[in-house]
Amino acid sequence: MRLLCLQGQCFYLQQYYNKEWCENTMLHVSVADVDAWYKFVTNQFEQQTFSGQSRVMGKPKDEGYGRVFYVLDPSGVLLHIAQFS
C-alpha cells in the first residue's frame, strides 16, 4: 500500500486490481478552483502517456452543486473533480 499526498491531502493506493470493481467506482474530489485543476490535469495528459482508457472527459461544466469535470483513470475509475458553489 502507498500513501500519496498532494498539497496536504492524502490517500492510500493498494496493489490490488479488480476490473469489475474499478469500472463501477466513482471518486469525488473537492477542489477550491476546478478550472485551475482542469488546466493542470489536461497539461499532464498532454505531457505524458497514460495506459488504458484514461482521458479527460470534457471541459468543466456547471452542475446543480457546483462546477465539475471528469477524468477516467487508467484502471477505469471515474474521477469527479468538483468545486462546490
Image (tube, rainbow, N blue to C red):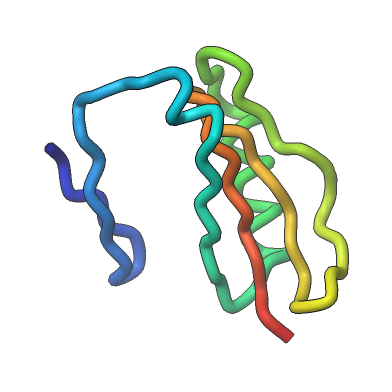
Residue occupying image coordinates x 70% and y 47%: 70
Choose top left, top right, bottom left or bottom right for residue 66: bottom right
* Residue nearer the viewer, 32 or 40: 32
Q: In this view, does 1 lie to the left or right of 71?
A: left
Residue occupying image coordinates x 68% and y 67%: 34
Q: In this view, does 2 lie to the left or right of 19?
A: left
Residue occupying image coordinates x 51% and y 52%: 27
Query: Horizontal and vertical percent for residue 82?
Result: 65, 66
Q: Is residue 1 left or right of residue 20?
A: left
Q: Is residue 80 left or right of residue 20?
A: right
Q: Residue furthest bottom?
A: 85
Q: In which quarter of the image is the N terminus?
A: top left
Query: Horizontal and vertical percent for residue 35?
Result: 73, 64
Choose top left, top right, bottom left or bottom right for residue 57: top right
Query: Horizontal and vertical percent for residue 31?
Result: 56, 71
* Residue nearer the viewer, 64 or 1: 64
* Residue nearer the viewer, 58 or 42: 58
Q: Which residue lies furthest to the left in this view?
A: 1
Above-or-below relation of 49 to 78? above
Above-or-below relation of 19 to 21? above
Choose top left, top right, bottom left or bottom right for residue 73: top right
Residue occupying image coordinates x 32% and y 21%: 17
Above-or-below relation of 12 to 49? below
Q: Residue furthest top?
A: 52
The count of marks equals 0
Query: Horizontal and vertical percent for residue 60?
Result: 81, 57
Q: Quadrant of the C terminus?
A: bottom right
